[in-house]
Image: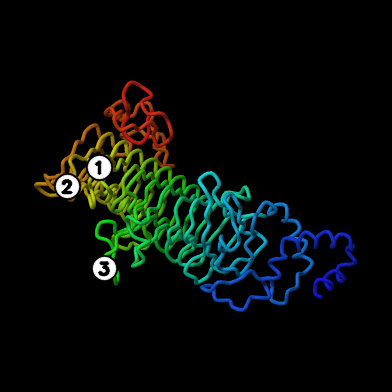
Amino acid sequence: MKSQHLLHTGKRHGYAFFQSVLKNVFRHLLLFVILSALYQCSDYEMEIEPVIPADNTLDVATVARTAALAADCSSCRYVVPARTHRIDGQVLGIKPGDKICLNAATNYTTPILFVNMTGTPAKPIVITNCGGTVNIKATGKSFVIKTEKSKYFRITGSGSGAGYGIRLSEASLGLTLDYLSTNFQVDHLEVYNVGFAGIMAKTDPTCDDATIRGNFTMRDVTFNDNYIHDSGGEGFYIGNSFYMNGMSRSCGIRYPHNIEGVKIHNNIINNAGWEAIQLGSATKNAKVYNNRIEHFGTKNVANQRNGIQLGEGTGGECYNNFINTGNGNGLNVLGYGDNVVHDNIVINPGLNGIFCDERVSPGPGFKFINNTIINPKQDGIRIYADQVPMNVIINNIIINPGSYGSYKYPRTGSDAYVYKLNKNVKLQMSNNTFTKNINQLKFVNSTIHNYRLQGTSPARDKGKDITPYNITKDFYNNQRLRGNTYDIGAHEF
């Protein structure tokens, strides 16, 4: 037998050592070896059983490395083998609270599909790395990792203690949370060099009734502490973009599901070809905050080049985001009409600092509060929302809008700071600071993007009371109202 041959070739290193090593290794890989005999195909779209190298041999270095990593992977209920496409929780008997691991010692090149991963709120199934940072390159494939029919689970790259323990690249999609996936958390992943979206999460409506609005709702999903860079399309593509009119299918118009309870926070997105963050159909309790976005919309595709897009059917809060340099709007707000957008810093957008227009707007109106907007190529805030009861623009700093000198009567340079579509846009606007000269604001150091106010800044103590909006922190996580009066802009002195 080949295992006996391996023992004999290792005698010079000590029979007892290899006997101990092989005992541990073969215990973990017994099922792995048995199923390898059944391996007949390599097409990643087919269901592939776990395999080991084709000749069933394990060299000395591989045995030693596997033994060394055994402690790191010992808590895993299941370790995903190489060249394995479909991981079915029902087939494997995965239980709530179980941990499924991707091994840093394994060369993963096949897209991995997780199906039927069903945990509980108290005991989610955890998919993570073990033995160090895992790199998965699914070159030329449609995705790197996908989930389907899964609920109450977490995909986390923090298992190694490193910043991003799972790194995904080279496919069209990095991670896609698909067909009826819900109640999950995704954190500490690095996704890069993908042809389209870094992380996608949605079940598009089809003629399968399980996929349509009313029959499925994605709930309580969180994306935090991920690093997405160099994506051909969106960094994050969360929720369907066609909430209002639905999508045409062979069985008629089908409406996409709602998302209730989504958080996108503390992520870094660089060099997104389209939007850095696009969120749609998130009707309840949506929060997009504390993200750092730089160089967005690099492909400069019209209507696909914004820093953050709050799309059709999206409500909730968008705050404390840093958005720096791109070809579109810093913030594109097409939401539910109850959106509160506050304490964001937007620098050098290629269009407007903030663009707002209603799509589906049963809410009371859009609120833009304490944002700092610098050097937009067009307007500071451009607002078209004329179908909601009242919009609010208060306590914002807008500096040097590029369109300032381009408007002619009856428009004036003031329209470059806040541009209203027409007189039907109902707007409560006060306590904003507008200037073409950034030095007037007396920031601590704008050359290194420190937009804290100095003590002599004219934005100090000039803000409107924002108590009714329940905004308690500024961009820098300082307590709001640290003096007698609120300050203007994203920093509270």
Q: Residue at x 80, y 61 (%)?
A: 23
Q: Which tag, 2 or 3, sits closer to the chain's start?
A: 3
Judge from the rendering whether residue 70 lies leftward or rightward of residue 198; answer left or right. right
Place residue 62 in its image quadrant: bottom right
Circle 3 crowding by C-alpha within 10 Å: few under 14, some 14–19, many from 20? few
| Residue type at the position of mark 2 | Gln
Residue 53 spot, x, y in % from top left: 69, 73
Question: Disc count in the image?
Answer: 3
Of the numbered discs in the image, which one, if any, rests on residue 366?
A: 1
Q: Residue at x 59, y 57 (%)?
A: 94
Q: CA distance from mark 1 to mark 3?
A: 33 Å
Label 1 element class: loop
Q: Secondary structure at mark 3?
A: strand
Q: Please tell me which residue is depicted at 72% across the width and 60% down the height of the picture.
A: 28
The amino acid type found where label 1 is placed reads Phe
Residue topped by disc 3: 252
Q: Which mark is residue 387?
A: 2
Quadrant location of the C terminus in the rendered image: top left
* Helix, strand or loop status at disc 2: loop
Is there a contact, CB below 8 Å, between mark 2 and mark 3?
no
The amino acid at mark 3 is Gly
Where is residue 442 shown, x and y percent of the image?
A: 35, 33
